[in-house]
Image (cartoon, rainbow, N blue to C red):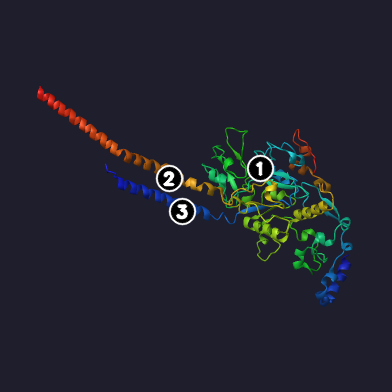
Amino acid sequence: MKKLNRRSFIKGGLATTAAAAVLKEKTSVASGDFDNYPEGMGVIVDLTRCVGCRSCEAACNKEQGLPEPAEPFDDFSVFDQIHHGQKRRTDESKYTVVNRYDPPEIDHPLFRKIQCNHCNEPACLTSCFVNAYTKTPEGAVIYNSKVCVGCRTCMVACPFYIPTFKYSKAFTPKIMKCIFCYDTRLKNGKPPACVEACPQEALTFGKRKDVLKIGKQRIRETPGKYVDHIYGEHEVGGTAWMYLSSVPFDKVGFDTHVPKEPIINSVKEFLAMVPMVLTIWPGLFVGFHLLATRKDKIKELEMEKEAKAKKANENDKKEEQV
Amino acid sequence: MQTRKKILRTAIALTTGALLFAPGLALAMDADDAPESITIDSMANLYSAVEFDHLMHTEYASCAECHHHTTGVPVADPNCIRCHAYTPEGDDVSCTGCHEANRFDKEYLDTLNDPQIYHIDKPGLKGAYHLNCIGCHEAIDGPTGCQDCHTMTEAGEERFDTGKHAPAGGSSGAHH
């Protein structure tokens, strides 16, 4: 067996740690450089245009073959519903929901449609350990129930609380969320059903970079109408669905504390540490342990030798006496 | 109306020089030129066609408020004035002349890629109607409920799970 002395062991350990550090540096650069499918599609939602007609909800329900709603889609009393202290949200029977807000700054209500925002670097995708999620070049974040194991980590990871779980079927796990009408429309160049249904063109569909331009043009050319911000341009590293509003976004239910960079960036340092902890640390610390206990072992061996020698001596003496 | 237009066009031809100085005056249409009523049915599907009382609406709004710069009546919006301060009457003043009914057709969307185009944000026909109508109706307390202007069809009831297609136990027909 090749003998490992202290010097060569420490040398080797340092080299592996340095290699891990270099690798980590490389991966973070690569992730930051990902240019998010520049030809991907997007939608800009203009809160000043939405009148809360719920046509988008009805269109989504039919397009996605979702279950019959509890209330008709022309029932506007749903805007007063509160579940667990919160306004309506997406669930296994609805991929999109419109809620009414009454900000005190203005004399009329505003309506906000929620659905999957189709992040450029989705946290659901990053968090999924079986790769059930895909960000398509068209811009949609789609989901494959065939590989899903139903761990629901994506539901925790999503900064917008969008993916929901089909609790009604316990043995065939399925995450239910807006897929940008990918299979039936987007991949054929058509807008999602909600966009086509909107009578007010509160939803404007096009390439993400183009609708972003449109949003900026609206802000610039109608001074005072909008707050000077497009929600989703930079939030969580950019989303395909973006919003324009006439009041500050936190007044109409938006989380304005989400980071301006992809969620992956918040956990990347930790994730890069995982292989190092799992592969290098065991060897490193076993080595330290062996080094620290080497002298004791030598002592032990020496003591054993001494004891043996003593015994042998005593035996010799006995034999002499006999 | 046709003969009047012909005379007008002859006058235009004869007074080209004058046009350079006062095109708005020579070309402006007025409410008398307009039809009394228009049936808006090109997109009727979930809702039935709208019988639009054009004459009645001319009492509430100037031509430019709905037809923008196309009727030769000067526009008021400072942003439009930048280019359309002296735009003469257009050949087509109807909504469909500019606002695309097939808003999401690839051919139409491709035309928006022209870097020379300023109006990249022009609403389609459905959007143009609703944005213009509802915006004004809200401002002057006109009717704003969906079925105040167009009644829902059978296909609409199916789409909205209402009327005949209402979910068992659910309420229906509620309005804002």
Going by the numbered disc 1, the residue's amino acid type is Tyr
Q: Secondary structure at mark 3?
A: helix
Q: Amino acid at mark 3?
A: Lys
Comparing B111 with A111, the one in front is A111
Along the line of sight, the residue nearer the viewer: A242 or B159 = A242
CB under 8 Å between callouts 1 and 2? no
Determine whether, in the image, residue B45 is placed left or right of residue B7. left
Q: Which marked residue is nearer to the observer: mark 1 or mark 2? A: 2
Quarter of the image holding residue A35?
bottom right
Quarter the N terminus of chain B occupies: bottom right
Chain identity of mark 2: A
Number of marks in the rendered image: 3
Q: Residues within 10 Å of mark 2 (few under 14, many from 20)?
A: some
- Mark 3 = which residue? A26
Residue A271: x and y in percent read 48, 45
Residue at the bottom extreme? B17
Question: The numbered mark 3 sits on a residue in which chain?
Answer: A
Q: Nearer the viewer, residue A288 or A94?
A: A288
The dot on residue A276 is: 2
Which of discs 3 and 1 lies nearer the camera? The answer is 3
Residue type marked 2: Met
Q: CA distance from mark 3 to mark 1?
A: 38 Å
Q: Is residue A260 left or right of residue A216?
A: left
Q: In the rendered view, does B76 fall on the left or right side of A144?
A: right
Which labelled disc corresponds to residue A95?
Answer: 1
Same chain under badges 3 and 1? The reply is yes
Q: Residue at x 74, y 43 (%)?
A: B159
Above or below, comparing residue A24 to residue B31 in the picture: above
Same chain? Circles 2 and 3: yes
| Residue A75 visible in the shown view | no
